[in-house]
Structure formats: structure tokens, C-alpha cells
Amino acid sequence: MAMAEPVAWLALDAQRHLAWLGELGSAMPAFGVLFGGVAFGGGAADGEVSPPGWRPRARRSALLLGAAGLLFAAFGLTPAGAAWWALPSPFFAGAVLGGLFLVGASLAPVGPRSGPGWLAKRMATSVRRGALLLVLAWAADGAASGWGRLQPAPPWSPGVASVLLDLSPRSLLMESGGVDWMRHPAVYEPVGTDRIGPGLRSVYAGPVAGSLTLLVGCMALAARRVLSRRRARR
């Protein structure tokens, strides 16, 4: 009995840190837009000719990767970082976070690194896009439970709820990290996951979902580069 209360508080803290980790997954595309807005030069995307060779592009990519590394290092020092490392599959959860970051970075604004206030203008656009991505991610995360507002609870049929869970960045992150998300208190009763059988939904498998998310992020950056070059040739 003497140990019951401390153990309960530890369990509560663990759930809170896991919730913070989920919030980070939702915010990662927004972080990608903000860091990408600074790292990427406009150059070719605005009709200017970039200097020949790989070095300018390599510097921008190195700056973006360095910013991502600092972000992950800072996050690792927080309680949510401890929750990340405590996951059964932290590597695949990290791949999801990295992929979401790269997807956001691919949506960063472009513009010439010249003119009065070019950095302020680019950052203002980055903030607007980041805010939009954050709102969309939060909406997707809360849709399956009706954002805690819709009644009766759970608000959706099992089929609709399963689709909304698939669209949630938090579900992608948690299940890729090995969490039994369908039975987690955050979704079990609010979403009614006890009604969702294997025929309606399959959980995200970390090796597949993590790798695909990271691949999609890399492809998004590559597509950004191709579109920028085509625009410069017009």
C-alpha cells in the first residue's frame, strides 16, 4: 500500500510524457517549414541562376540537417525524449519524426536571398505555413474522438473511426514506435477502439511505416528541387 501512490504517480508521468511525444509528432511538419525557410535559398526557384556545382546545394542541405539534429538533441533532453527512448521501437519512431520534418521542410517558402528584409518576409511566410500545418495535424489527431466535443461518445462508426485513426500523425508515431495505441487510454474509450476489429484496421508496423515515412520525406524534398529547376527554366 505504501508503494501504490508513488507507482501511480510514475505511471501518470509516463503517460503525460508520452502525450508530449505525440504533440511533437503533430508539430514536426511545422518545425520543418520553419527550419526549411531559413535553410533553403530561393535562387533557381525565382528565376535566378544558382552557382554551378554541388556546394551551394550541399550547404543548404547540411544546414537543414544540422538544424534537425539540434532539434532532436534538444528534444532528447526533455521528459518526452525519455519517453521516446523508452518506446519498444524508438528507431522507427525517430524515422517517422524525421520523415514528417522533411515533409514540412519541402513546403518551406522560397525566395531570393537579396533585397530588403528578405529573411523577415520568408520567415513570416514560414510561420503562416507552419501554423496551418500545425492546425491540420491537431485536427487530424483529434478527429477520431470528435475532438472531445461531439456527443455521444464515441462519435463515429467503427469504419469512420478506423479511417480517422489512420490519418492521425499521433497514431502513425505511436504505433511505429511499438505502442499498443488501440488500447491506450487516450483513444480506447474516446474513439471506441474496442469496436474496431482486424478486418477494419491494421496497426502501423514500425519497420514499414517508419521507412515509408522517411522515404516520403526524402521524395518530397527531391520533388521540391525538380519543380524549382523547371520553374527556373521557364
Image (spheres, grey):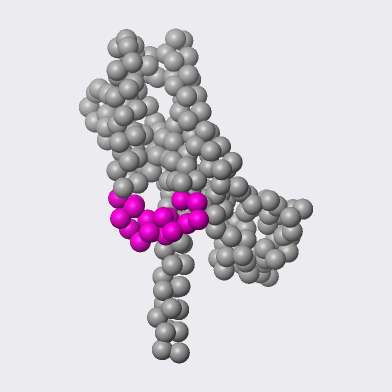
Q: Indicate the quadrant where residue 106 lies.
A: top left
Is residue 76 part of the magenta span, yes or no? yes
Residue furthest bottom as drawn = 1
Is residue 202 part of the magenta span, yes or no? no
Range shown magenta = 74-90
Q: Residue at x 34, y 52 (%)?
A: 75
Q: Is residue 229 above or below residue 179?
A: above
Q: Position of residue 121 (x, y in %)?
A: 30, 33
Residue furthest left as drawn = 116
Q: Residue at x 32, y 41 (%)?
A: 69
Q: Position of residue 212 (x, y in %)?
A: 56, 37
Q: Indicate the quadrant where residue 32 lies.
A: top left
Please state, as top left, top right, bottom left or bottom right, where the N terminus lies in the image: bottom left
Q: Residue at x 39, y 31 (%)?
A: 109
Q: Position of residue 195 (x, y in %)?
A: 73, 64
Q: Residue at x 54, y 49 (%)?
A: 176
